[in-house]
Image (spheres, helix red, strand yellow):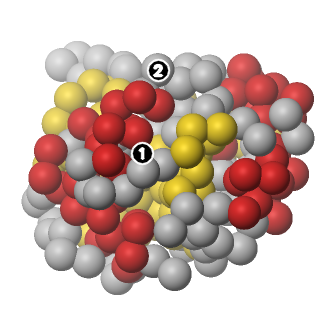
Amino acid sequence: MRLAIIDNGGANVASLKFAFERLNCQPIVTTDAATVREATHVVLPGVGAAADAMARLQSSVLATVITALRQPVLSICLGMQLLFEYSEEGGTPCLSAIQGAARRMSAAMGRPVPHMGWNQLQISRASALVEGIRSGDYVYFVHSYAANLGPATVASCNYGHEFSAIVASRNFYGTQFHPERSASTGAHVLANFLRIT
């Protein structure tokens, strides 16, 4: 197995690398297009603003590389939002690997944005990524934008309204939450990803 983590400037890359190492996997953190193409599994993490993240991917030609990949790709947090066609954050065109858009979450009394902390998954359909995961399991979020429910939705969460917490379409998978910060449930999701071929 050759796991490539795309170094797209996110602060969570180190903790994600350690999370995979705890699963006896030694990932390569890279921005090299050839390394990404040759990997058996690819992870696109993300923290920060959509426009900045897309600009980094485009400047390193990784935007076109990612969308052409046929091996399993796991996108995390902002990385998951980038899988969609568009983000309302900065009016940013994204990778268009999955139909839909990331939209700004609505704040309310007692429900601030960003949505930060633990929330429960509701599994809506089967996927290799959620084998052994149950509705009601808790995962950890830090985000202000989210995708609505759609054909790619595997699991949702509710924060004033339902949003996609896990998506899957073809070889592309996404978690809006941070599996590397989501204790045993997050570790289980990462282990499931490594088993996808």
The residue that disc 2 covers is 11
The kind of residue tagged 1 is: Gln
Q: How crowded is mark 1: few (under 14 residues within 10 Å), some or many (20 or more)?
A: many
The residue that disc 1 covers is 176
13 relative to 89 in the view: left or right: left
Q: How crowded is mark 2: few (under 14 residues within 10 Å), some or many (20 or more)?
A: few
- The answer for how far apart the CA atoms under marks 1 and 2 are is 16 Å
Please tell me which residue is depicted at 35% across the width and 43% down the height of the picture: 177
> For this rendering, which residue is in front, 41 or 100?
41
The answer to whether residue 136 is seen in the rendering is yes
Q: Do the residues labelled 1 and 2 touch (CB within 8 Å)?
A: no
Q: Which of marks 1 and 2 is in front?
A: 2
The kind of residue tagged 2 is: Ala
Please tell me which residue is depicted at 18% across the width and 19% down the height of the picture: 110
Query: Quick one: SS at disc 2?
Result: loop
Please tell me which residue is depicted at 17% across the width and 55% down the height of the picture: 185
> For this rendering, which residue is in front, 183 or 103?
183
Where residue 170 appears, as percent x and y from the top left, is 62, 77
Where residue 56 appears, as percent x and y from the top left, is 77, 27
36 relative to 145 in the view: left or right: right
Residue 129, placed above or below residue 7: below
Where residue 48 appears, as percent x and y from the top left, is 55, 20
> For this rendering, which residue is in front, 71 or 88?
71
> For this rendering, which residue is in front, 25 or 54?
25
